[in-house]
Each structure stands twice: as C-alpha cells, then as structure tokens.
Image (cartoon, helix red, strand yellow):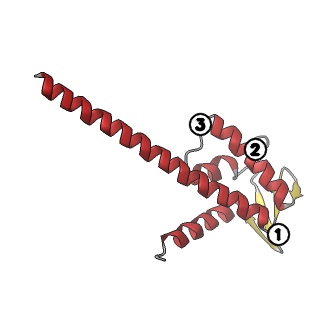
Amino acid sequence: MDKLVKRTMISIIVAIILSVGAYAAELLSVSHAEIAHLLDYLSTSECEFYRNGSWYNAEAARSHLERKYQYLLKKKVIRSAEDFIAKAATQSSMSGEAYQVRCGKDIFPCAAWLSSELERLRQKQALPP
C-alpha cells in the first residue's frame, strides 16, 4: 500500500472516531438534560415518593434519586434517561422494593410515572415550533 493510501485511510479512521466521540458527547448531553428534567418534574410535583416502607415529599425524593444518579454516573452505568429510570428510579438498591409515586389518591410505579413524563417531554420536543 502506498503512503498516500495509508494516510488517507488513517485520516478517514480518525475522522470517524472523532465524529463518533462528538455524537456520544451530544447524546450524553441530551440524556443529562432529560434526566435533569425528570428530577425537576419530580421535585416540583406535589406527589409523594415511597421508598423502603416510608413516604417522602417530592424534594426528598429528588435528593435521593439525584444521589443515586451521581453514584451510578461515576460507575458509568447511566448513558440515557431510560438507564436512569431502570437503574436508579425503579427500586431500592438495598431492599429491592419497588419505588412508588403517590399523587393525591393515585399510586403509580415510579418507573412508569417517570417513563410517561419522558415520553411526554420527547413528544413535546418533537413538535414543530
């Protein structure tokens, strides 16, 4: 293989690696914004959060889930809003008991409640201005 072909191939490979890295960074940025929205949605709701046998107010729930999120983020297991819901907001890591959200008299699994809001957010963002 001549030097020009090798240089061209190397340039193409580097360009692909850089574009994949930029895409991954953008994806993580979008995921972080979605997770921040979900945490804000929870903390500004008037709902309560059930965890390990007790009900907590929305701000305490946000604080708990945000700590779990930061911990799991450092372990590099959260790459999307779906990962956040599945790995941080579905159940207690200690007891395995499912988290719940109570809004008035209605009680929902936390994962379903947050997934519904994530879907609403994405639909809203997909609408043309």
Q: State the residue in front, 23 or 91.
A: 23
Q: Residue at (21%, 31%) from the top-left corner?
A: 9
Mark 2 or mark 1: name the one nearer the start of the chain.
1
Left or right placement of residue 73 versus residue 64 in this view: left
Compared to residue 85, the image places residue 115 above or below, namely: below
Q: CA distance from mark 2 to mark 1?
A: 21 Å
Query: Looking at the rendered structure, which numbered label has been put on residue 67?
Result: 2
Point 31% across, 38% down: residue: 15
Instruction: Label 1: state its secondary structure.
Output: loop
Q: Amino acid at mark 2?
A: Arg
Q: CA distance from mark 3 to mark 2?
A: 14 Å
Front-lying residue, 104 or 60: 60
Q: Quadrant of the N terminus?
A: top left
As shown in the figure, which amino acid type bears the numbered disc 1? Glu
Q: On the picture, is 13 further left or further right than 75?
A: left
- Secondary structure state at the residue bearing disc 2: helix
**Amino acid at the residue labelled 3:** Lys
Q: Which residue is mark 1?
A: 46
Position of 26 relative to 115 (above/below): above
Counting residues from the start of the chain, the first of labels 3 and 2 encountered is: 2
Q: Position of residue 38 (x, y in %)?
A: 67, 60
Query: Does residue 19 appear in this view?
Result: yes
Instruction: Return the residue at label 3.
Output: 76
Q: Residues within 10 Å of mark 1 (few under 14, many from 20)?
A: some
Question: Counting other residues with Cα less than 10 Å from the Cα at mark 2, is it few (<14), some (14-19), or many (20 or more)?
Answer: few
Across and down, in percent, residue 3 comes to: 14, 22
Question: Under tag 3, what secondary structure?
Answer: loop
Label 3 Cα crowd, 10 Å radius (few <14 / some 14-19 / many 20+)? few
Residue at 14%, 28% (x, y): give it. Answer: 5
